[in-house]
Structure formats: structure tokens, C-alpha cells
Image (cartoon, grey):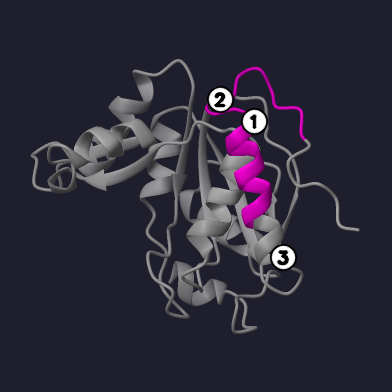
Amino acid sequence: MRPDPGRRALPASIGRRGGPLTRWLGRAILRRLGWTIEGDLPDHPRIVAVVAPHSSNLDFLIAIGLVFCWNLRVRFIGKKELFWFPLGLLLKWLGGIPVDRGASRGFVEQVVTEIQRSPSILLGMAPEGTRTFGAKWKTGFYRIARQADAIVLPVYLDWGRRVIGLLPPPPYSDDPDRDLAGIVGLFARFPRKDGRTIDVARAVG
């Protein structure tokens, strides 16, 4: 029998949302899809969770299964045009952060400001931005984390074993390029749905 994916003790610094119903729903999603969870959340008030590899329309649902299982309060980024009334109320309730892509203040600066307003935050990002193999990673997640004094939490989707897992946050150095290559490299052993693995050179090139 596979382990119950919902059994975890969360650090006090992690924001929570939901209750028994959402935990049940999260477990039901993952069991129906045949997935389980590995790893633990770090005890840190500011986390940028990087989810990869992205290779299926089911990836979002799998991630939601994890969020519901653990009753996590997760934030995500969306362009401000999506936050029209009344949809905007729902998106903000779900954790959406509206960002004005055309503002003089850059995308990274807007998100950093939002993070710094919060005593604790878990921001989820998918840096590939597409399911296409060989995509170049967007580096905004790294700049946001560094400027906001947040840690980067690698969250992998291992389609070979059907496991969504969390790795220990990697340390920063004084070389952003080396840091980025190291972060991408952490995901290189986890197969996509099509069986291929991330090409690190193409992702950071």
C-alpha cells in the first residue's frame, strides 16, 4: 500500500488554508492519479517554490493535490488583466498576485514588494512556462527570491515514479549563473511524462 500523501507536520512559519475537506480532496486527487509525495517543507517565512519539469496538462492538478493535502496557503502570479470583477475576487482569494506587465516598475520589483508586505509567503512558480521540451527557463524566480530574502524550494514532478517531491533549498553563491545552473541541474534526473529529462545546457543557455 502506498503511504498516505497527506500525513505531514508542517513548520510553524508556513501559512495554512483549508481543513479536513481540502485534505481529503487533495488525497483523493493524488490517489486517483496514482501519485504520492516525498520530502518536507523547510521552516522559512519566505519561500519561492519552483515546480518542474512541466510536461503535462495534469501538472497543475498534481500540484493542487499537494497544496490541498497539506492545507497550504500558496500565492501565484497573474497579469492584472485577469483580475476583473468578480473573477478578480476569486483569484485573490485563491492567492493570486496581480502584476502590471506594462508598468514602469518591473515585474520582479512588483512581486518583491508584495512578498515583503507579507510576514510569511509561499510563492509557486513554473519557470519553464511551457510543456515544450528544451524550453529556456525564465530567471525571474531567482531574482525575486534573492531580492526578497527568500529561499528557492525545488519541487519536482517525477513521472517515472509518479512522485511530486520537495528537495532541500540550495545555497546561494556570489555567481547567479552558477546558482541557476545548479538549480536547473537538481531537476535533471526526474523524467517528464514523455520520458525525457531536462536539458540543463538548453535550459540555462
Q: Residues within 10 Å of mark 3 (few under 14, many from 20)?
A: few
The circle on residue 20 is: 1
Mark 1 and mark 3 in contact (Cβ < 8 Å)? Answer: no
Q: Which residues are magenta?
A: 8-29
Quadrant for residue 110, please give it: top left
Q: Is residue 100 above or below residue 116?
A: below
> Which residue is tagged 3?
34
* Image location (x, y in percent) of residue 120: 49, 21
For the C terminus, give its image quadrant: bottom left
In the figure, is residue 91 to the left or right of 104? right
In the figure, is residue 142 to the left or right of 38? left
Give the residue displayed 69% in from the left and 23% down from the top.
11
Dot in front, 3 or 2:
3
Give the amino acid at mark 1.
Pro
Mark 3 / mark 2, whichever is N-terminal: 2
The alpha-carbon separation of the residues under discs 3 and 2 comes to 25 Å
Residue 173 seen in this snapshot: yes
Q: Nearer the viewer, residue 27 or 124?
A: 27
Give the residue displayed 70% in from the left and 53% down from the top.
165
Give the residue displayed 45% in from the left and 15% down from the top.
119
* Image location (x, y in percent) of residue 61: 52, 58
The alpha-carbon separation of the residues under discs 2 and 1 comes to 12 Å
Residue that protrudes farthest toward the right in the picture:
1
Give the amino acid at mark 3.
Gly
Please say whether residue 149 is one of the residues in the magenta stretch: no
> Which residue is tagged 2?
16
Give the amino acid at mark 2.
Arg
Mark 3 / mark 1, whichever is N-terminal: 1
